[in-house]
Image (tube, rainbow, N blue to C red):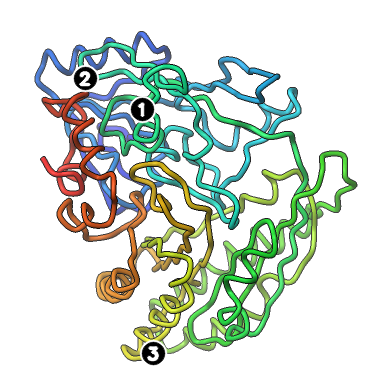
Amino acid sequence: MTRPGGTWQNWARTERVRPLTVEYPSTIEAVRRSVRSAAARGRPIKAVGTGHSFTGIAVAPGTLLELTELSGLVSVDRERRRARLLAGTRLHRIPALLAPYGLAMTNLGDIDRQSLSGAISTGTHGTGARFGGIASQVVAATLVTADGDLLTVSETENAEMLPAVALGLGALGILVDITIQCVPAFVLEAVERPEPLDAVVDDLETRADAVDHFEFSWFPHTATALTKTNTRLPAGTATRPLTATSRLVDDVLVRNVVHQSVCSAGRAAPGLVPGINRLSARVWGDRTFSDASHRVFATSRGVRFREMEYAVPLENLASAFRGVQRVIDENGWHVEFPIEVRVAAADDLWLSTATGRATGYLAVHRYWTVDPTAYFAAVEEVMLAHGGRPHWGKMHTLDATALRARYPRFDDFTALRDRLDPHRAFRNPYLDRVLGG
């Protein structure tokens, strides 16, 4: 978000910049004018969403475009179940836009505060062995190129670019509208329960493959996996949503207010963390409910944190998790945040963390005022040894040389970047690092 005085910072407070210019385009034509104006001044230009990336992917030293006003539904193709949305539309607003048409997004992550363009550009994903990330739902997009022209990419226009543009890191142009493949609206039944950690990890691939959506969290220093299994049910199925009281107690008080206090106490007295985590594992996640899909997928996150997430081949996920357990124990770290484990289907997007392989995700966090450097470095070493690819919007240390070896279509992407943005109108320090200058 951009604060008074012109300083932009992300949600995690890991990145900040004072851009030379901040603009708030509300139309596609206004975006085109902004791009041309930045080019005439010799300034790089970047669009930002809600700042939920932990990396500097959205940092804009030159012209910063806040796309808050470029929001809403453009059109719906009822027959093909496709919705065209303006790029700045927030994910949490999309369900209400789709509801009159009986449609829903195929899958969502556990946070829905991001903009649609930001979510797809960074590879935001949910969980489910047969479901890809949000970018895999993109069937068409329009972007403003470096010269201010419009480029349409779809199955029938410039189709060869779609696997790059759908997850483009903001390096190919400014996305202005996006068409997503939807599905009929559906209900999710969620079963959240604590289970013995070793049993869950030993049977991880089977568990993930047997249901629609499976994930688990683990508080370090405990022997409990907090599992969540979501089952897809037809729209019209009778639901048992969480009551207002349950949401207040479980999601607001326990998972946010109490956890905030726990993190603060853990920073002041790290020795308390193991005991606190064991208590947290007993009070989190033992409930069954059902509701419209988007109300089950997304959760409220009020505690500020910093995050690293890596994607590994699914068959390596259990071993990678065990490796992270080991480095925590060996270093005697008192880690106050749970580790999250999810899965996703393979896709064919050039820079997707799931490109070409069924994928497991492992995410680690630290409270935002705690220095995560040593912990994240050790986790990163484990992930890289297991074939890991870093989430583009989460903290990592890799550069273009290291990433090239991990993405079969990396050079194809950078060649397309050379073609669409030869003078690097959309560059910033993060893109220079991960893609090369």
Mark 1 surroundings within 10 Å by alpha-carbon count, few (fewer than 14), some (14 through 19), many (20 or more): few
x and y percent of residue 434 in the render?
Answer: 20, 48
The quadrant of the picture occupied by the C terminus is top left
Q: Which mark is residue 329?
A: 3
Q: Nearer the viewer, residue 118 or 61?
A: 118
Depth check, mark 3 against mark 2: the one in front is 2
Residue drawn 68% across the image and 70% down it? 285
Q: CA distance from mark 1 to mark 2?
A: 19 Å
Residue 371 makes an appearance in the image: no
Q: Secondary structure at mark 1?
A: helix
Q: Which residue is mark 1?
A: 160
Relative vertical location of residue 50 with respect to residue 39 in this rendering, above or below: below
Q: Secondary structure at mark 3?
A: helix
The quadrant of the picture occupied by the N terminus is top left
Residue 169 makes an appearance in the image: yes
Q: Earlier in the sequence, mark 3 or mark 2?
A: 2
